[in-house]
Image (spheres, rainbow, N blue to C red):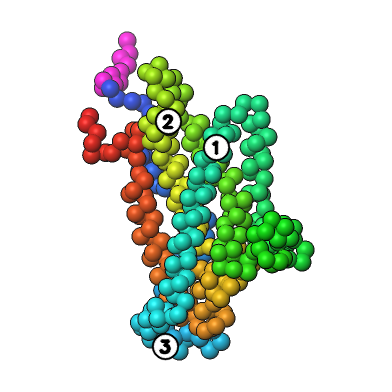
Amino acid sequence: MTLTQQSPPAAAGASSTPPRRPRKASAKRSLRAWAYASPTAALVLVFFVIPVVLVFFMSGADWPLLAGNKGVNMPDNYTDVVDHRLFWPAIWFTLKYTVIATVLLIGLGLGLAFLVQEASRWRAFLRTTFLLPTALGLASASLLFYAMYSPQVGPIAPLLDKLGLTEGVVSPLGTPTGALWSTVILIVWRFAGFYMLLLLVGLQSIPGEVYEAARIDGASRSQMFRSITIPLLRPSLALSTIMCVTGSLLAFDQFYILTKGGPDSSTMTVVQLVYNLAFESKRDLGMAAALSVIVLLALVVINVVQLRALQGSDDGTGAKKKGVKR
């Protein structure tokens, strides 16, 4: 009789599979994430971080356009820019243009969004019609409006003369007020559909049950607009306002093509002044870089203020966080 030696029973809870290696799997996931993010990070580094660092360096250097870096002259570039005769007029005009464009674009975009949302039969046609101008580049649209405003070939100047709004056939771009509002009309035509789309997405994300409950409670349309639509639309309004304000403060193409900053530098924006200092009047890259740094810091401050002023509550109802009790 032979005896066979039996192996001891496995301990309770022991597994026959080999233990996992979470650190190795985590390292693989991290490497994969870095591989996906590296192209975007490289683009941000090359086209944003390095240029910003170079602009800060140039803003403290004596750097003529055709002579190269001549050494540090900090803070002469900043004082020279602030003392420039067009600095404060350009800031004032840019702020005025920003307020006008923002109010008109957000107001008209919201109105068009309501129109498209309420229209049932013509919704697709209206949405396509309002969005068509956004397919045209800003430079191309500016050239189109420049031809329309032309007294020689455009239809607008003769029309204004026939209506008695001008004395003779003159260009609407010939006066400071006319140049400003002519450019505003171009911008509203070009971008109103874009902001309509942003606000329409926000309107369509509001649950219909909220409006139905308000109707049952006897709320009027104005009360629902104030108490439901605007608070729930706050994120879309914040995004649209920030984009509109930032784009208006950095306005360049439309004014450069339509007015060249004229007449008499009355439509000179801050970004136009940067271009003027770098390539036309002064040909001083150091002064232009100093003004660019001032614009960048101002944009950061303005966007932070806008975010804090327009931010909603955690639940998206528009109530302030400090006043909400859980």
Q: Secondary structure at mark 2?
A: helix
The location of residue 60, given as percent across then percent down, is: 39, 80
- For disc 3, the marked residue is 71
Residue drawn at (44%, 62%), measured in percent from left and top? 95
Q: Amino acid at mark 1?
A: Ala
Q: From the viewer's perspective, is the residue at label 3 or at label 2 nearer?
A: 2
Determine the residue located farthest toward the right in the rendered image. 153
**In the rendered image of this protein, does residue 54 appear above or below residue 296?**
below
Q: What range is drawn magenta here? A: 1-12
Depth check: give the residue in front, 279 or 150: 150
Taking the image as drawn, is residue 169 in sight?
Answer: yes
Label 1: which secondary element: helix
Proximity of marks 2 and 1: CB atoms separated by less than 8 Å? no
Residue at image mark 1:
113
Asked which quadrant contains residue 130, the reply is top right
Mark 2 or 1 closer to N-term?
A: 1
Within 10 Å of the Cα at label 2, are there few (<14), some (14-19), or many (20+) other Cα atoms? few
